[in-house]
Image (cartoon, helix red, strand yellow):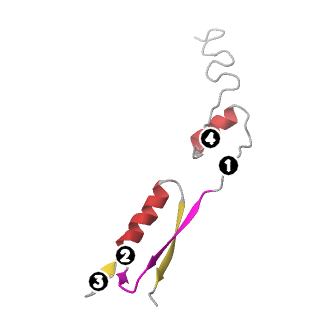
Amino acid sequence: KAVVGQDIRPIGFDIKQNEVVVEKGTVLNSCELGLAASVGATEVLVNRQVKVGILSTGNELLSPNEPLQEGRIRDSNKTMLLNLVESIGCQSVDLGVAKDT
C-alpha cells in the first residue's frame, strides 16, 4: 500500500545546486544527454568531432586483402592508424595511397 511521501526524494537529493553533471571533454551519448535534460540543460556547448586523414605513401604498398607479391608489403600501418584514431573518439578518413614519384 502506498504511503504519502513514499519514494519521493527531496529536491537536490541526487544533484546539488550548481553541481557539474557532465564534465568538460566528455563524449556525449544518451546517458549524458538524459542527465543534462534532467537538470533543464536543453542546449550544451560542444566541439565538433575531430576528423583525421590517413595517407599512406609508397609504390610498394598493397591493401591488406591483396595477395602478397614479391617486393611489396601490405599497408598494415593504415589499418592500425585508422583504428587508433577512432579509439580516441576522432573520425578517421582513409585518403588512400600516394605513389612515389
Disc 4 to disc 3, C-alpha distance: 47 Å
Does residue 53 belong to the magenta stretch?
yes
Say whether disc 4 or disc 2 marks the residue closer to the N-terminus: 4
**Pointer 2 local density, CA inside 10 Å: few below 14, some 14–19, many at least 20:** some
Does residue 58 belong to the magenta stretch?
yes
Say whether disc 3 or disc 1 marks the residue closer to the N-terminus: 1
Relative to 101, does residue 78 appear above or below in the rendering?
Answer: above
Disc 4 to disc 2, C-alpha distance: 37 Å
Q: Residue tagged by mark 2? A: 75
Disc 3 to disc 1, C-alpha distance: 44 Å
Numbered tag placed on residue 46 in the rendering: 1
- The picture quadrant where one finds residue 17 is top right
Work out whether residue 1 or residue 75 is closer to the camera in this orientation and state it: 75
Residue furthest to the front: 101
Q: Residue tagged by mark 4? A: 24
At label 3, the amino acid type is: Pro
- The picture quadrant where one finds residue 74 is bottom left
**Could you say where residue 65 lies in the image, as x and y percent from the top left?**
34, 78
* Residue depicted at 36% across the width and 82% down the height: 62
Work out whether residue 10 or residue 87 is closer to the camera in this orientation and state it: 87
Work out whether residue 66 or residue 20 is closer to the camera in this orientation and state it: 20
At label 2, the amino acid type is: Asp
At label 4, the amino acid type is: Lys
* Residue depicted at 31% across the width and 80% down the height: 73
Q: Residue tagged by mark 3? A: 67
**Pointer 4 local density, CA inside 10 Å: few below 14, some 14–19, many at least 20:** few
Q: Which residues are magenta?
A: 49-62
Say whether disc 3 or disc 2 marks the residue closer to the N-terminus: 3
**Could you say where residue 75 lies in the image, as x and y percent from the top left?**
37, 75
